Image: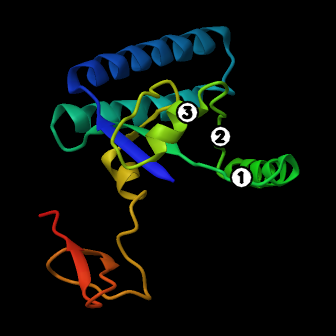
Amino acid sequence: MSIVNRPANDDSVIRQLNKKVTILESERQTYENKGNIDLIHPLEKMIYDYDQIRRQVQTANDKLFFVTILLRINSTNLEELDAKSNLLKNEFAKISAKPRTLNFRQLEGLKANLPFNELNIFDHERNVTSDGLATMFPIANSNTESSPNGVPIRKKLLYRTTCIFRYF
């Protein structure tokens, strides 16, 4: 499994969020004029959410990222591959996510999944805020030790010491 993230350009994010808010407001106005009140409340909530994200990005209190999550499935035969693929699809369906297959691009996927920092797959990325991005990293675990100096990543096998990632 590989998680690749890259920051989005703030100017384009603000422009896109403004465009989304404008489209949603016009839809809300259209439904309101037609008397269809069923969708007005969800549209107002979406407008509020997009406006909050835009305000956070404009004031430099938040940032948007493009995230690509790559999973490699190994199997010895087609039946095992189908079983693992179906299990993965079912798990992703629980969180309303859809895994996509890199048809005819398996070599690109393998290279992107290796730790060479070579990502050429940009058509399967999603945008997330910094809060969403923070949930993808295993920061705390009740079974591991913690350190005020940083985040424990792994133990060195030779000396059994903990490797600490110092972010601050």
Q: Are marks 3 and 1 in contact (CB under 8 Å)?
A: no
Report the disc number at residue 53: none
Is residue 85 left or right of 162 when viewed as pictured?
A: right
Q: CA distance from mark 3 to mark 1?
A: 21 Å
Most extreme residue toward the right is: 79
User: Does dot 1 land on a helix, a strand or a loop?
Assistant: helix
Q: Which residue is mark 1?
A: 88
Of the pair 63 and 83, the residue shown nearer to us:
83
C-alpha span from label 2 to label 3: 18 Å
Q: Secondary structure at mark 3?
A: helix
- Is mark 2 in CB contact (under 8 Å) with mark 1? yes
Q: Quadrant of the C terminus?
A: bottom left
Residue located 71% across and 55% down the image: 91
> Image quadrant of residue 102?
top right
Q: Is residue 140 above or below residue 126?
A: below
What is the x, y in percent for residue 40? 59, 26
- Closest to the observer: 17 or 92? 92
Residue 99: numbered disc: 2
* Residue 153, image x, y percentages: 31, 73
> Mark 2 or mark 1: which comes first in sequence?
1
- Using a 10 Å C-alpha cutoff, classify the residue at mark 2 as few (fewer than 14 neighbours), some (14 to 19) or many (20 or more): some
Above or below, comparing residue 124 to residue 35 in the picture: below
Crowd band around label 3 with a 10 angstrom C-alpha radius: few (<14), some (14–19), many (20+): few
Amino acid, disc 2? Pro
Answer with left or right where residue 167 lies relative to residue 75.
Answer: left
Callout 2 secondary element: loop
Q: Which residue is mark 3?
A: 107
